[in-house]
């Protein structure tokens, strides 16, 4: 339960960062068309998926600091977003490049926020 709840918190942090960067015009200034509205539908699906991704923290990655583990595990949802969701579901090309050339960098950064926020929540729960 802790890992799912922590992942949900990470999903909320990730979603707020994506929204904030879009609302502040940061993604747009970088030539990336990612600026979602902060709606319940946007938040709900991302928080639930964040929780499911949080189960990755159950993997037995021994001798790894929790924040390093969060950064490493954030690569999994990034890979799925870049190579499955964007090209196959959102029809935005491989790595979402139709949204802008810097899209992969933003995806990696936003999912890093998920990983670190999830790791922090797990650490605080212990």
Image: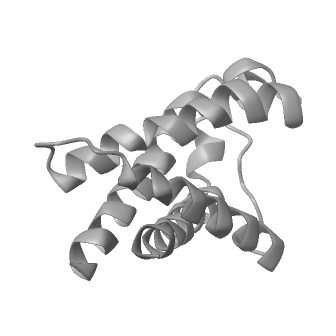
Instruction: State the residue at coordinates (55%, 50%).
Output: 26
Coordinates of residue 55 in the picture (x, y in percent):
48, 57
The residue positioned farthest toward the top in the image shown: 94
Say if 38 sits above or below 68 in the image.
below
Say if 28 sits above or below 82 in the image.
below
Instruction: State the residue at coordinates (65%, 59%).
Output: 49
From the viewer's side, name the closer residue of 94 and 45: 45
Coloring basis for residues: one colour
Q: Quadrant of residue 30?
A: top right
Coordinates of residue 76 in the picture (x, y in percent):
51, 36
Say if 122 sits above or below 108 in the image.
below
Left or right: residue 85 compared with residue 48: right
Instruction: State the residue at coordinates (37%, 65%).
Output: 117
Q: Quadrant of residue 39?
A: bottom right
Left or right: residue 119 compared with residue 81: left
The residue positioned farthest toward the left in the image shown: 63
Instruction: State the residue at coordinates (38%, 54%).
Output: 58
Residue 107 seen in this snapshot: no
From the viewer's side, name the closer residue of 30 and 20: 20
Coordinates of residue 92 in the picture (x, y in percent):
83, 28
Left or right: residue 8 compared with residue 72: right
Q: Quadrant of the C terminus?
A: bottom left
Across the whole image, how many numbered discs are drawn on residues? 0
Coordinates of residue 71 in the picture (x, y in percent):
32, 44
Q: Quadrant of residue 2?
A: bottom left
Residue 33 seen in this snapshot: yes
Left or right: residue 35 compared with residue 126: right
From the viewer's side, name the closer residue of 55 and 43: 55
Say if 126 sits above or below 30 in the image.
below
């Amino acid at each position: 339960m802790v890992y799912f709840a922590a992942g949900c918190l990470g999903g909320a942090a990730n979603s707020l960062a994506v929204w904030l960067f879009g609302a502040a015009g940061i993604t747009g200034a970088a030539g990336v068309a990612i600026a979602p509205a902060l709606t319940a539908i946007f938040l709900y699906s991302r928080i639930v998926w964040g929780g499911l991704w949080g189960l990755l923290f159950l993997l037995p990655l021994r001798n790894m600091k929790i924040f390093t583990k969060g950064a490493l595990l954030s690569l999994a949802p990034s890979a799925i977003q870049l190579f499955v969701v964007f090209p196959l579901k959102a029809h935005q090309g491989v790595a979402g490049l139709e949204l802008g050339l810097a899209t992969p960098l933003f995806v990696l950064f936003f999912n890093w926020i998920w990983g670190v926020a999830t790791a922090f929540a797990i650490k605080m729960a212990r």
